[in-house]
């Protein structure tokens, strides 16, 4: 039974995506309805798995003793699967509206479904090899989505994305091999599979660092973040879901698996590798936030904000304590919700009105009130204003950092707070310009602006409500994260 | 009972604000009526609140085990709520007349009400998280007030306000967060909620963080070094908003500092430490510097803004002295300054509305055309300078007394000296307005007839001026009440 | 077993020689069919022999003529040599099959049968290199191989190929010359030419400590000679021009078989002439390791800058040869097994790439990566084969390339830290670099092009290519998903070398 449910979660979207690619559809409408139906069905299966609390290990394809495809759902995996399963259907609905008028729709929706299945695979992966395989597959399945507009920028962006991800996978591969050769089989075990330093501390640290940088490419750690701004040329549903939720969170999730379940925090904490990783993520927070302040292109601003926020998650994970893991998981959930909402708003503005620059958003709040009300919620959550969910996750990160007590943690905290200040600046300037245009504003520039349609507004409203409610009633989520961290 | 009252006090301004925002096309009368009735209702509820036992509290919801939103009413809440309700009411009445000048009244009213909502929540906060939440809300909801005229200066000023306030709030958050680790609870406890055994060994950390937190919250109160937004933001807002910003919203920062010192860290923790010295130095510096800068300003509203910077730091000085009389003086100063500053800004607003003059140098002979306004201005000035029998004298007296009895090596004489100098400067920047307004000189030709405007303009002014005088003369009850509050926490 | 007493290897060699001679008088179609049947036969025979050896679990010797060693000639093999021989003939079969369309286009009609003469000769030489137990015989067939390789290059008569084949001839002859020098030195020291005798002699000479320098020089010369011929950095110069200009089958054969044949012979020499201990102790292995690492990086760097798709694949070959030499350099057990696995992988993958690229070129008429945009949509099968090959080169899981990298990494971990860290880092780096240019190509061929002509090439338009492409891809994926069998076979064979 468990086996069946796992396989449904992964293969239903994969097969339906392949079917969409192969078969010819009579109308775009039928295609869209099929896509949304399949994704909802897969999410339903995922929620069934989560609620049934299945914890079995399913060995899918054994290649050899160490290399086999194994699925197993532990606490952290459940968390990630929950995020993915909740957000994908909403994006599908949003995409149905956004992709009106685009060509090559089967290509888009086919790979959209396939990517869902693969991300579910990453969440369900029971050992490092499985996660690595699905990680690589995710790169392959998302490249067609990036390239979809078929403009020169899109093709260039796809190439850059591909190269960065493959490079990262190569580094991750080296790290994985180190573990497989010296660890106890590669399964994800709380506390890690490495029991001692096989060649001395420095070598272990070096390989961990390689793995961190390798998997961290997808999580946009400095200096390997450069693909993320390029990829913002993709259609907004892609940017929103994949590059704010699936791909980047998969990267952060992989880093977590590497740190907590493969190498093991007992071996790594206190080493120079940990400090390097902490400082790198702290720097990226500040760097991303400051680039966001300078960005004048709406989506790019949000993309740099993603870079900064991902490093909040990586920083939390780099603390290498259960509290750190909990905080990182919480921020994963909070940020996913918030950032996808922000991108939806940006996409609505882009799609219905063709406006991409922040300067063009002057006074647009009057004409797109619902969209910008939702965006304001996202801004509040991102800055970390209680009672929104962003505040709860930032609080936990700070708590975890203080729990560590080392000077690097304090430096990290300082960067964190600076990043929060900058995020207030870059989000609220947009909010204020949208709602309170300057005195020279005549209304002419937004005369032709229209509000988004229900297929976009519904997900936005749900998500905005989510950012508030998940903050106010954050008890269940916090305890789920705590359970995942083994606290 | 408390819960019901509290929820009503929160819902009424919030609901009225939302209603105002939707009432863009309604008639002026309807908008005005809604505003005034909401503010009046709020004041009524406040009066009812006074009958409840002190220290009633209730929990609204909990985000996690540690992070809860809780309300509690104690003596300090009552003090600050007085400002919030009465001050907003009088400014609101003024605004109904003033807003004929600028457009978009419904948005203005809406955010005025929202700001009141945030402040009510903050004043009744029972723990640091609730206070932080409403503090941030107060910042965000008052930005549109600053932004109202939509000129480039207004936009620039509001961005500055946003930046400074959020920076300050984040420093405050840092403090909250560190404090939470060393206390058993985040709730406000008299004498401090720190777990002293946990603290031992980490005193320096807590001292540093307390300093940062106070400086951070002090941004809202215009304390050096994070005061830079205030002289830009307060003048650029419409006059009723400036009044409320200077008179009431800045007190939110003061309240945060008060709670921080007396209810979280505990005065004993800070007394005699280097932190206290630093804080007192910063406050005194602000006092002096604010007065100096006020003296040099020609634009009336800017002069009043710098004056606020200076005067609020009187309060902070009192709080930082950590003595009975110092705190007492500070609390009294809160009350009196609010009264006075609202009055002064509304006077300035009335002058701007009726004559279009913004600079002090232009106000020659204004007493002839707007006598009631200028009389109110004068009486308020007396209180601000600290001349008996106006109320301001009492608060400054206690401040000086507090300094003398504090036993601090340098501060016990430095504080009174600075207060004196500042008083002289205050006189120097306020009295000329009065003098030149009433005694313009022989060459002056009266232009324009006597008009103080409709009652909505001069009635609030008169009430406030009268209050500042009466509180000074018959202020015994208030003074004793302040004394009891001070002894409660020391 | 009477079956086994039949001298299959010699039979295969003689058969190939005969077919080659006969093809010179046959017409094109007949020569082609003969060649294909020859390859098939040899493959079947070799695989049979291999399974016999595996079952027997030991080595087999055959005498040539009736004189026992040390005077007569000898063939010796375990399970490894027939397996490689079989694989090589299979690859040759598929290469010739898949490149038929290009052959018809590129070569003048009256010369077509000579092409098959040359390929048969190449087959002869490769078989001989696989099976021979004698150094001089090896040298002779090396030369034959060189000449026939130049032949299949030059047979396409355009300026570029003539120039390229001259360059190739020069390099190859330099390599052969160095090999001959080493051979002569060795003969001078030991007085033997048969491998078992040589092994004994070399061991005793090495143990006694005398003649160290000449012995080392001889080993170095032989190694470098074979390295030059197979394209070790920095002697990979000739590769891009050669592979880039030749007809598709020739590129496939040269890159997939010929270079591998030389390396296989080198490995045999290492084991059966110098002995593993001496070779690794002498430091030559370290040099190979370093040169291999350099080749991995340099080859990929040059490939990134290439526009012409064939030259890009050729530079990629240089990089892959680097992998093989790195494997030799890492360790004599795990390293060499990994390197031989990679030889097979490359032998399967490189022809795949060349053939499919040629198909893509012929359906669009363009040869640069940019201009080939969308070509996979015109010729889906070629596109698919190209993508599988590229993914294998990058090292994507489920392809043979990934398994090769895995085995290399495992070998690296078992080696000393001084070898492990550079090996792993360069492995990762070269994966990144491969991802750049192969990724670029994949994306380019997949994105829908601007060309309005959407006529698709169907499978039945070019059945031979379809058969060849599908079989090669199937082999790649099969051994990518299930490498254990192959790996164990190679390991067993290596031990019996």
Image (cartoon, coloured by chain):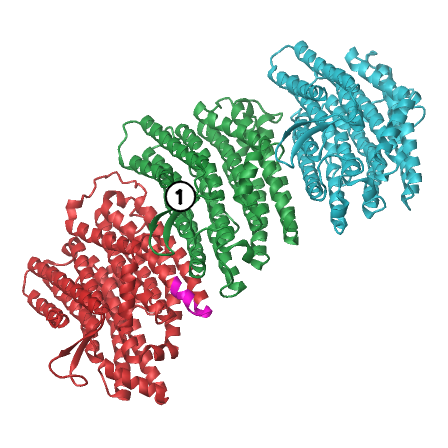
Chain colours: A green, B cyan, C red
Magenta segment: does it hold C410? yes
| Image height of A249 relative to B377, above or below | below
Give B47 or B141, whichever is nearer the viewer: B47
Q: Position of residue B301 (x, y in %)?
A: 78, 27
Question: Which chain is mark 1 on?
Answer: A
Image quadrant occupied by the N terminus of chain A: top left
Magenta range: C409-419
| Image height of C160 relative to B279, above or below | below
Residue in the image at 41% along x and 42% along y = A119
Q: Position of residue B463 (x, y in %)?
A: 84, 16
Q: Is residue B286 visible?
A: yes
Mark 1 = which residue?
A: A121
| Image height of A160 relative to B80, above or below | below
Magenta segment: does it hold A244? no
Q: Position of residue A87 (x, y in %)?
A: 46, 34
Estimate how packed mark 1 is, as few (under 14), some (14 to 19) or many (20 or more) residues with alpha carbons within 10 Å: many
């Amino acid at each position: 039974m468990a086996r069946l449910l796992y396989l449904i979660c992964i293969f239903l979207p994969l097969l339906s995506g392949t079917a969409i690619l192969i078969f010819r559809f009579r109308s775009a409408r039928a295609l869209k309805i099929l896509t949304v139906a399949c994704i909802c069905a897969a999410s339903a299966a995922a929620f069934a798995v989560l609620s049934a609390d299945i914890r079995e290990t399913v060995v899918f394809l054994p290649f050899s003793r160490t290399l086999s495809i194994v699925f197993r759902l532990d606490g952290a995996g459940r968390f990630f699967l929950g995020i993915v399963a909740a957000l994908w259907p909403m994006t599908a609905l949003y995409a149905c509206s956004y992709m009106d008028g685009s060509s090559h729709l089967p290509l888009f929706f086919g790979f959209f479904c396939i990517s869902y299945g693969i991300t579910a695979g990453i969440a369900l992966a029971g050992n490092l090899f499985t996660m690595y395989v699905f990680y690589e597959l995710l790169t392959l399945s998302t490249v067609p989505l990036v390239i979809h507009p078929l403009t020169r920028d899109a093709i260039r962006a796809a190439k850059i994305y591909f190269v960065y991800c493959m490079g990262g996978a190569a580094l991750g591969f080296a790290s994985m091999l180190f573990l497989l050769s010296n660890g106890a089989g590669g399964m994800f075990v709380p506390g890690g599979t490495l029991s001692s330093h096989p060649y001395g501390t420095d070598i272990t640290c070096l390989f961990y660092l390689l793995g961190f940088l390798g998997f961290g490419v997808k999580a946009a750690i400095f200096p390997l973040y450069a693909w993320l701004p390029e990829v913002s040329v993709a259609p907004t549903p892609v940017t929103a879901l994949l590059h704010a939720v699936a791909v980047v969170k998969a990267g952060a999730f992989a880093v977590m698996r590497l740190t907590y379940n493969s190498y093991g925090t007992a071996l790594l904490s206190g080493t120079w590798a940990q400090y390097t990783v902490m400082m790198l993520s702290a720097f990226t927070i500040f760097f991303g936030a400051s680039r966001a302040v300078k960005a004048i292109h709406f989506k790019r601003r949000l993309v740099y904000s993603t870079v900064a926020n991902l490093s909040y998650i990586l920083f939390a994970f780099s603390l290498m304590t259960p509290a750190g893991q909990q905080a990182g998981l919480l921020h994963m959930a909070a940020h996913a919700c918030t950032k996808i909402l922000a991108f939806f708003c940006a996409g609505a503005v882009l799609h219905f009105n063709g406006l991409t620059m922040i300067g063009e958003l002057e006074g647009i709040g009057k004409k797109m009130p619902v969209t910008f009300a939702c965006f304001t919620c996202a801004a509040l959550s991102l800055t970390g204003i209680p009672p929104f969910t962003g505040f709860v996750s930032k609080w936990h990160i700070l708590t975890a950092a203080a729990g560590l007590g080392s000077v690097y943690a304090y430096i990290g905290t300082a960067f964190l707070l600076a990043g929060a200040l900058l995020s207030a600046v870059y989000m609220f300037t947009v909010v204020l310009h949208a709602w309170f245009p300057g005195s020279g504003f005549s209304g002419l520039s937004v005369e032709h602006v229209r509000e988004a349609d229900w297929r976009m507004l519904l997900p936005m409203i749900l998500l905005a409500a989510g950012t508030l409610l998940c903050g106010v009633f954050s008890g269940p989520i916090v305890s789920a994260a705590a359970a995942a961290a083994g606290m | 009972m408390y819960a019901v009252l509290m929820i009503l006090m929160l819902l009424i301004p919030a609901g009225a604000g939302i209603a105002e925002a939707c009432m863009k096309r309604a008639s002026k009368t309807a908008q005005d009526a809604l505003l005034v009735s909401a503010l009046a209702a709020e004041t009524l509820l406040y009066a009812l609140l006074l009958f409840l036992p002190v220290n009633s509290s209730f929990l609204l919801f909990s985000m996690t085990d540690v992070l809860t939103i809780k309300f509690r009413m104690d003596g300090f809440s009552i003090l600050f709520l007085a400002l919030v309700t009465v001050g907003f009411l009088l400014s609101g009445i003024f605004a109904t007349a003033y807003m004929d000048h600028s457009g978009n009244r419904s948005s203005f009213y809406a955010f005025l009400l929202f700001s009141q909502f945030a402040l009510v929540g903050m004043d009744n906060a029972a723990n640091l998280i609730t206070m932080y939440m409403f503090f941030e809300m107060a910042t965000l909801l008052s930005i549109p007030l600053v932004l109202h005229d939509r000129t480039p200066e207004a936009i620039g000023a509001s961005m500055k306000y946003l930046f400074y306030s959020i920076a300050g709030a984040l420093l405050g958050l840092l403090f909250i967060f560190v404090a939470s680790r060393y206390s058993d609870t985040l709730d406000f406890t008299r004498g401090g909620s720190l777990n002293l055994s946990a603290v031992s060994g980490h005193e320096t950390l807590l001292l540093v963080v307390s300093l940062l937190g106070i400086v951070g919250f002090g941004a809202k109160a215009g304390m050096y070094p994070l005061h830079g937004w205030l002289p830009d933001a307060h003048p650029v807002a419409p006059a009723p908003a400036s009044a409320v910003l200077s008179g009431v919203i800045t007190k939110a920062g003061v309240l945060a500092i008060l709670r921080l010192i007396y209810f979280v860290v505990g005065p004993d923790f800070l007394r005699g430490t280097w932190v206290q010295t630093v804080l007192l130095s910063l406050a005194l510096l602000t006092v002096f510097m604010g007065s100096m800068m006020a003296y040099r300003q020609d634009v009336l509203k800017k002069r009043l803004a710098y004056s606020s910077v200076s005067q609020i730091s009187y309060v902070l000085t009192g709080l930082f002295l950590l003595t009975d009389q110092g705190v007492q003086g500070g609390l009294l100063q809160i009350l009196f300054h609010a009264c006075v500053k609202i009055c002064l800004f509304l006077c300035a607003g009335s002058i701007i509305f009726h004559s279009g003059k913004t600079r002090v140098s232009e106000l020659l002979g204004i007493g002839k055309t707007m006598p009631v306004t200028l009389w109110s201005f004068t009486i308020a000035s007396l209180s601000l300078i600290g001349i008996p029998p106006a109320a301001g004298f009492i608060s400054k007296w206690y401040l000086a007394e507090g300094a003398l009895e504090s036993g601090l090596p340098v501060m016990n004489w430095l504080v009174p000296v600075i207060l004196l100098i500042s008083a002289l400067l205050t006189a120097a920047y306020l009295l000329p307005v009065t003098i030149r307004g009433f005694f313009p000189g022989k060459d002056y030709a009266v232009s324009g007839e006597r008009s103080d405007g409709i009652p909505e303009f001069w009635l609030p002014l008169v009430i406030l001026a009268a209050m500042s005088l009466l509180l000074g003369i018959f202020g015994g009850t208030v003074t004793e009440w302040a004394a009891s509050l001070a002894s409660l926490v020391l | 077993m009477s079956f086994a007493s039949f001298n299959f290897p010699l039979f295969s060699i003689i058969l190939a020689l005969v077919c080659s001679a006969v093809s010179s008088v046959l017409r094109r179609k007949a020569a082609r069919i003969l060649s294909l049947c020859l390859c098939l036969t040899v493959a079947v025979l070799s695989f049979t022999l291999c399974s016999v050896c595996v079952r027997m679990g030991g080595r087999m010797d055959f005498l040539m003529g009736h004189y026992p060693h040390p005077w007569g000639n000898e063939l010796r093999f375990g399970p490894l040599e027939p397996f490689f021989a079989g694989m090589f003939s299979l690859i040759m079969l598929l290469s010739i099959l898949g490149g038929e369309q290009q052959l018809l286009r590129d070569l003048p009609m009256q010369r077509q049968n000579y092409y098959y003469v040359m390929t048969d000769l190449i087959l002869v030489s490769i078989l001989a290199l696989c099976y021979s137990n004698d150094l001089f015989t090896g040298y002779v067939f090396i030369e034959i191989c060189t000449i026939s390789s130049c032949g299949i290059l030059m047979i396409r008569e355009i300026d570029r190929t003539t120039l390229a084949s001259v360059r190739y001839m020069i390099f190859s002859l330099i390599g052969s010359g160095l090999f001959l020098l080493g051979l002569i030195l060795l003969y001078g020291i030991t007085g033997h030419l048969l491998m078992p005798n040589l092994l004994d002699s070399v061991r005793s000479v090495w143990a006694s400590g005398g003649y160290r320098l000449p012995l080392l020089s001889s080993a170095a010369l032989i190694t470098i000679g074979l390295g030059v011929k197979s394209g070790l950095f920095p002697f990979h110069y000739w590769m891009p021009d050669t592979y880039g200009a030749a007809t598709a089958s020739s590129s496939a054969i040269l890159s997939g078989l010929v270079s591998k044949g030389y390396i296989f012979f080198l490995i045999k020499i290492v084991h059966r002439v110098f002995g593993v201990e001496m070779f690794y102790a002498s430091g030559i292995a370290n040099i190979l390791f370093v040169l291999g690492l350099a080749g991995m990086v340099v080859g990929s760097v040059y490939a990134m800058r290439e526009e012409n798709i064939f030259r890009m694949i050729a530079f990629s070959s240089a990089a892959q040869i680097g992998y093989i030499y790195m494997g030799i350099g890492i360790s004599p057990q795990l390293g060499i097994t990994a390197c031989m696995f990679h030889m097979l992988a490359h032998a399967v993958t490189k022809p795949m790439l060349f053939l499919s690229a040629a198909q893509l070129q012929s359906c669009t008429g363009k040869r640069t990566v940019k201009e080939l945009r969308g070509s996979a949509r015109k010729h889906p099968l070629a596109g698919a084969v190209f993508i599988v090959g590229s993914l294998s080169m990058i090292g994507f899981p489920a392809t043979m390339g990934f398994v090769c990298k895995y085995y290399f990494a495992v070998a690296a971990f078992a080696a000393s830290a001084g070898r492990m860290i550079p090996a792993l880092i360069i492995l990762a780096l070269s994966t990144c670099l491969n991802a750049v240019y192969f990724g670029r190509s994949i994306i380019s061929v997949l994105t829908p092009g601007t060309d309005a002509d959407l006529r698709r090439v169907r499978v039945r338009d070019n059945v031979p290519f379809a058969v060849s492409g599908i079989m090669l891809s199937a082999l790649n994926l099969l051994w990518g998903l299930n490498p254990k069998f192959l790996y164990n076979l190679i390991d067993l064979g290596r031990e019996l070398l």
